[in-house]
Image (cartoon, helix red, strand yellow):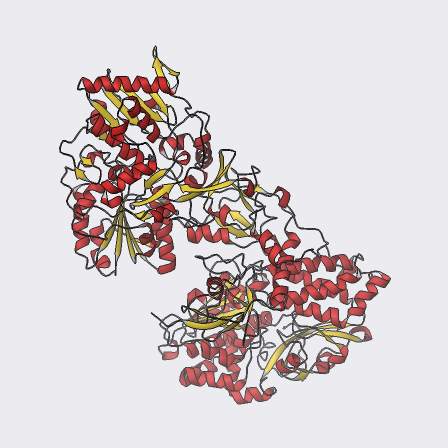
Amino acid sequence: MPDPINFTIDGRQLQAAPGTLVITAAKQAGIEIPAFCYYEGFIAKAACRMCLVEVEKMPKLQTACTLPVMEGMVVRSATEQIATARKMTLEFLLTNHPLDCPVCDKGGECELQDMVFRYGAGESRFTEIKDHADEQQWSPVVFYDPARCILCFRCVSVCSEGMGVGALGVVNRGVNSEISPNLHDHLNCDECGMCIDICPVGALTSGIYRYKTRPWEMEHVGTICTHCSNGCKTTLGVRNDQIVRGNNRDRSGLNGEFLCIKGRYGFDFTANEERITSPLLRVNGKLEPVSWSTALQAVAKRFTAIKEAGGTFGVICSTHTTNEENFYLQKFARQVLGTNNIDHQRTGDVVTLFDALSGTTGQLATIEDFYKSKAVLIIGADLSQQHPLLAFQVRANFRHHNARLYVTGEKPVREDKIATRAAHYSDLRDKLAAEPGLLVVFDDSLKGQAIRDLVAFGSTLNYPVSYCCLVDDSNSRGAIDMGLVPELLPGYHPSNQPGMTAAEMLANPDLDALWVVGANPPGAIVSTKAFKVVHDLFLTETAQKADVVFPSASAYEKTGTVTNVTGEIQRLTQALRVMGPKPDLEIIGLIGREMGVAAQLGPWISDKVLTEIRSTIRAYNVPLPLIDTGGAAQTTPVNGRIPVETRPELIQSQHDNLFTSGTLGRYSEILNSVLEHQRQ
Amino acid sequence: MPFNEPNPAEVRIISQRFSLENSASIDTYLANEGYAAFRKALEMGPEAIIEELKASSLRGRGGAGFPTGLKWSFVPRTSPKPKYIMVNADESEPGTCKDRLLMQFDPHQLLEGMLIGGVAVDSHQGYIYIRGEYRYLIPIVDKAIEEAYAKGFLGDNLLGTKFSFHVRTHTGAGAYECGEESALLESFEGKRGIPRIRPPFPAVSGAYQSPTLLNNVETFSSVPAILRMGGANYAGLGTPKNGGTRMLCLSGHVNKPGVYEVPLGFPMMRVIEELGGGMRNGKKLKAVIPGGSSCPMLKAEECDIPMDYDSLAKAKSMLGSGGMVVLDEDTDMVRVALRIMRFYQHESCGWCIPCREGTTWLKKILTRFVDGMGNENDIVMIGDLSKNMLGRTFCPLGDAAAMPTIAIIEKFRNEFEEYLANGPRAAVPQFAMAH
C-alpha cells in the first residue's frame, strides 16, 4: 500500500491515497467543492469552472476536479476570491438560462437552484435579451431544452463512456452549442434515461413524468425492479397511490446510479386499466367477477375433492414472485397437495453449475465482481440487451481498471468494441491463463455437460474462476433456490420422487388440477378435465382458459424478498397500495385457510415465512440487518453434489431485450411506445 | 512579388528569399543555402541542435513567446512512442498575416525547420495544420513537399543516413481556437476543437497521445538560419533573452502597411515612422495594438518602447504574434472594443462557462452601448465582467478577450463617457459593422 499523501484544505490537515483528486479528498473530509460538469466515474472536464480553488505556490486558480493531491499541498476553497469566482460563474450561467423554475420539472431537485442558493448572488445584473432555442423531443421519453442546458456535458459522458452507446454529441460552437441526438433530431438508443437523471438542470427531462408533479409531493420508495434478474434498486416516486416515476438518483442499491429503461420507466403496467381487480369464476362458460369468498371456496372445495380422490395436481410457478411466496407455494404443493409436480420457466442451468462447483467455495460472482474482476469472459450473452446492469458494470470495469474483456457467441454485441472475440472460449486458453483472475458469465447457450466442460476448463487456469449462470427474471434464481422444480426441494436437496415438469403437466391428459401462479406457459393444456386456477395481473392467454382467476399484486405492491442472478437477496418495499389485487402469498394462504390447513402452512406473513426459509435453507441464513437497511446479502451457495438428472432441453431463456419483459412488458404502455418509436 | 516592398530598415533573415523569382521552388531554395542546415543538423545530433536553439534565445513566434530550445528539450526523445512534429499554421490572431507569406514564398524553409526538429527529437513524421481559410496555400505547400520527396529531402534514408522524415498537410475548418495547441491537436485527431486539460503538455502527450513538438510556422522557419549562422550570432541580432529577428505585420492607419522583418528590440516608433512611412493623412497616433488583438493596447505616450517580448511584458502588454495595429486619433475606441469582443464571442469554443457566457454578455452590453443605449453602469460592468473572466477560463481565449477590454476601458474610459454625454459617434460608412 503506498503511503498516504499529507495536505491541507481550508486549514484542515488531511490524508488521502496518492492519485486522489482534490475535489474527492475534500468531499471525504466533508468539505463541499461545487461542480456541475464533474461526475464521479467519468473523465474530468474542468468545463464549468465551479470547482476552482486556490493552491499555494500556484499562481492561477486550479480546478479541484483535475488536480491530484500532492505532499504538502495547501488548498483554500473558502476565500473571498473563491466566493466571488463561484458567484460570477453562476451569474454568467444565469445570463442565458431561462427563469423557467415555475414550469420546469426539475424545480425542487435542481442542482443549479441549489448552487445559486448556496453560492450565487441574490440578483442578476444581466439586463440584455437572452438567447433562446425551442425545446425538442428526441424520443417518447426524452425531451431536450437547449435554453436550459448549462453545457456540463454529463449526458454525453454517461451515454458514451457509461453506456457505450454514444447517442449524444455536441454541435455548434460557443454559446450556440447544443447537445445533439444521434439521428439529428431524434434518438436511436437504449432509452435508458440515464441522461435525464444525470442532468443537473431541467434541460433533459422525462416525457413520462412531464408536468405531473413536484418532487416534494411524491413519496419516494426504494424497491427492487421487477423485470430482469440483475436486481437493481429503483426509487419509485409515488403520488396518490400512483407511481409517477422511477429513478435511482440517490445511488443506493447494487446498481449505484444505473438504471435501464425497464427499471426507470417500466412501472406503468401497474396502472394499466386491464388489470384484473377482482377474482373471476367461470360460470356457464364465461369468467364472471365474484367475491373473494366465492372464489376461494370454489378452489378449496375442488382441491380438497381432488386430493381425497388421489388425483393429479400440477403447479406452475412464477419467475417474479417473492422467495416467501415461492417457498410457501411449494410447501402447499408438497405437504398439503402431496405432489412434486412443481415447475417454472427455467432460464438458466444453475443446478449443473452448482453441481460442477461442488467442493469449492467463493466461486460464484457478485454484482460487484463484475466491476472488480481483472478479466471477464462473456459466453453467448448480449449483456447490454438482457442484463444491462451487468453490461454497465463490465464497461465501468474496463474504463476504470482496464479490465480485459473476452466474448464468444453468435451475434455481435456492444462489448465487441472493447473486447477480444473468439469462436470458442478454449481458443482463449493462453490469454486467459495469463490473466490474474477471471469472471465467466454465460447464458442458456451453455447447459448440462457444456457447463461441466466450462468448469473443467476453468480449473486448468491457475486461479479461482468466478462464475455467473444467467437467468432471466427478477426472481428466477429464487425460484430454483426455493425448489420450484420437480426434482429438487428447497435448498437443492433432491426430492425422492421427482414430479412432472411444466411441459409434462400441460401434455398430461389425466391432469386433474392445474395451478398457475404468475406464469403464462405456452402450449395447450391437454387435459380437458383439469380444474384450472390462475393468479395473474392480467388476463393472459392462460388466465383466459382458467376456471378461477385471482388478481395478483405486482412486486411494487407488496413486501417480500427476491434473489437476483448473482444470488444476492434483497427486500422489496411496498410502494403502492392496491384495491382488489392481493399478494400471491396472501391468496395461497387464504386458499389454505379455506381448506383447513392454515395451521400446517403457517401464517401468510412474508417476514414469518422468511424466518422459516432462513432456518430451512442454510444459504438463506443471511444477516437480516443487511437486507433490512436496503442492502443486498449474498446467499452462500450449496456446496455439495446435486445428484439429479439435468434436463437441458427444459432450459430456455426468453431472450428479452431492453424493451420487452414478458407479460409485464406487454402491458407497459411506455415500453410499447418506445418499441413503436424504434420501429419507425 | 511579395506582399509589400522590402524596407532597408529590415533585417531579412527568414524573409530573405521572398523577392526571388520562383522563391517557393526547391531549385531556388537549394541555390540559396537551402537544406544546408539540415545537413549540418544530421552531423550535429539532437543535443547539439537543442543547445544551439537555447543559445539563440529563439522564442515562440505564434504568440506565447515560450523559449523554443527549452520546449524542444521537453520532448522525451527516447520514448518508445512515435514522436511527431506539428506545425501550427492556424494563423488566426487578428492582425497577423506573416505565416501565410512564409508558406507561400518560402515553404522549403519551413520544411527544413521541421526536418531539423525531427532530428532533434527523433521524429519521423511531421504535419502542417493549415487553417481552413488558407485553402489556397495547400497546393503550394503540397507542391513543395512533393519537390522535397523527389529530390530526396523527405522520405526514407535521407542524405545517405538512416534518418527518415515524412510530411503531410492537414486542413482546419475555420476556428480560431484551433490555433491553441491542444485544441489544434484535438481537431487534427478529428474531434471537436476543444482544448485539453494540461498537464500533460503536447511535448509529452500530443498527437495520438504521443510526444509532439508543436511550434508556429515562423518559429520552425527560423531554425535553419540559426543552425547556419550559429545560435549566438542569431541571438546577437536581437536583445538579451530576445534573440534574432521576427516578422511584424504592420496594419492600421499608416502609410505603408505590410509585413516587415525586424530584429527583436526594434523601437515601435521606428516601425511606425520608418517601416510604416508615418501616420496616414498626417493624423496623430492614438494607440497601438502591439502583437494581435489579444494584447492590451498601448496609448500613444506608451509607444516609445522596444518591440521585444520582455519590454512589452513589462508594459503589461505582449509582443504576441507580431500583429501590430496602429490606430489614429479619429479611431472610435468604443467601436474597437465591440469589434474585438465580437471576434472572441464568435470564436469561443463554448466549453467553459466564463468565456462562453462572459464574451456573449460583454458583446451584448457593448452592442447596446455602441447603439447609443448605454448607461454609466455599463462602463463599470464591462470592466468587472472582464476582470472576472480573467484567469478563470479553461484556456487563454478568455484572457485574450478580457485583457484588451480591460485595457480599453481603463485607458479610454473618457471615450465611453463621451458616448453617454454626446451620444454615439457616427460610424465611418465603409467601416460600419453589420450587427
Q: Quadrant of the N terminus of chain A?
A: bottom left
Q: Image check: A278 left or right of B326?
A: left
Q: From this view, report whether residue A311 is shown above or below residue A365.
A: above
Asked whether A34 or A339 is in front, the reply is A339
Q: Is residue A105 visible?
A: yes
Q: Is residue A190 visible?
A: no
Asked whether A414 or A518 is in front, the reply is A518
Q: From this view, report whether residue B235 is shown above or below residue A114.
A: below
Q: Residue at x 54, y 56 (%)?
A: A36
Number of numbered discs overlaid on the protein picture: 0
Q: Image check: B183 left or right of A490?
A: right
Q: Image check: A172 left or right of B305?
A: left
Residue lying at the far right of the rendered structure: B422
Q: From this view, report whether residue A519 is shown above or below residue B203.
A: above
Residue A353 falls in image quadrant: top left
Residue B135 falls in image quadrant: bottom right
Q: Residue at x 33, y 50 (%)?
A: A367
Q: From this view, report whether residue B140 is shown above or below residue A98.
A: below
Q: Image check: A536 left or right of B26?
A: left
Residue B250 falls in image quadrant: bottom right
Q: Residue A268 location in percent, x, y?
A: 45, 33
Q: Residue at x 75, y 74 (%)?
A: B287
Q: Residue B167 location in percent, x, y?
A: 45, 69
Asked whether B385 or A17 is in front, the reply is A17
Residue lying at the far top of the rendered structure: A284
Q: Residue A132 location in percent, x, y?
A: 65, 47
Q: Residue B204 location in percent, x, y?
A: 44, 72
Asked whether A306 or A103 is in front, the reply is A306
